[in-house]
Image: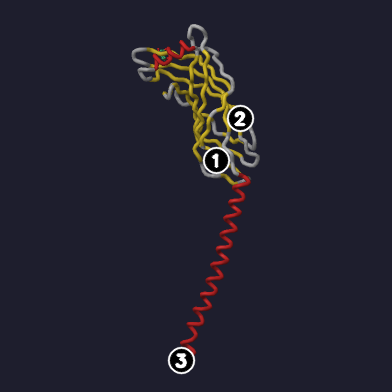
Amino acid sequence: MSLLVAASPKDCSKKGFHLNKKLLYGFSALLVSILSLVFLVWLILHPTKPEFYLKDTAVYELSLASPPRLLNSTIQTTIISKNPNARVGIYYDQLRTYAAYKGQQITADTALPPFYQGHQDINILSSSLNGISMPVAPSFGYEVSRDQTAGKLYLELKLDGKLRWKVGSWVSGSYRIDVDCVAVIVLRPGGDPGPMSLVQGTQCSTTV
Ligand SMILES: *[C@@H]1O[C@H](CO)[C@@H](O)[C@H](O)[C@H]1NC(C)=O
């Protein structure tokens, strides 16, 4: 009687080990197939970052008071945005644009309304950028007059915010998006920078 009792727990533990091993194998197989399914879906849908082009930029005002070096500027810009994905939509949030010259911000931020971009859709983002009495670096006046002599002014147009991918009814978390465009402003003889100094479409660099 006592022998039987002693043998029973040993038997039980052996059986339990077998069961655990089977469960472990089953669980790993399930995990591997789930992971490969997720990977396959990702491979098929793999979102490509949106493309941005600068359609046109017009500088209406760029006047510097000196001293103190305070800049007033009025710039109008149109950026074209394209979603190259056939199966992925994009939500844009907290978008803002501003203009910079040689790395210095020269207009205030202009907020753009949030929007949804469907599969392979194209959206036109127009913004009016204004700077009122913006302080600029001492070199600003010198740099602008040098560009005026050359007849060309390089303006940087920045767009940044957040995006979320949409696949079917699933929406991803937020990712930062940074878009940098360069506008070549052709100055009229005499160096007057505006109005209506237009540039043709150039591709912008996009970082997500
Ligand atoms: C910039 O705009 C402000 C406000 O309208 C004005 O007082 C200032 O004189 C302007 N500065 C220049 C350089 O035009």
Q: Which residue lies furthest to the top in this view?
A: 190
Going by the numbered disc 3, the residue's amino acid type is Ser
The answer to which of marks 1 and 3 sits earlier in the sequence is: 3
Going by the numbered disc 1, the residue's amino acid type is Arg
The answer to which of marks 2 and 3 sits earlier in the sequence is: 3
Identify which residue, 84 or 75, lies in the foreground: 84
On the image, numbered disc 2 is attached to which residue?
123
Q: How far from the left and from the top, in percent, is residue 27?
A: 56, 64
Q: Is the residue marked by circle 3 packed among few (<14), some (14-19), or many (20+) residues within 10 Å?
A: few
Q: Residue at x 58, y 62 (%)?
A: 29
Mark 2 vs ligand 1: CB under 8 Å? no
What is the distance, in whole Å, between disc 1 and disc 3 at their CAs? 68 Å
Cβ–Cβ under 8 Å for marks 1 and 3: no
Q: Residue at x 59, y 23 (%)?
A: 201
Cβ–Cβ under 8 Å for marks 2 and 3: no
Q: How far from the left and from the top, in percent, is residue 144?
A: 43, 15
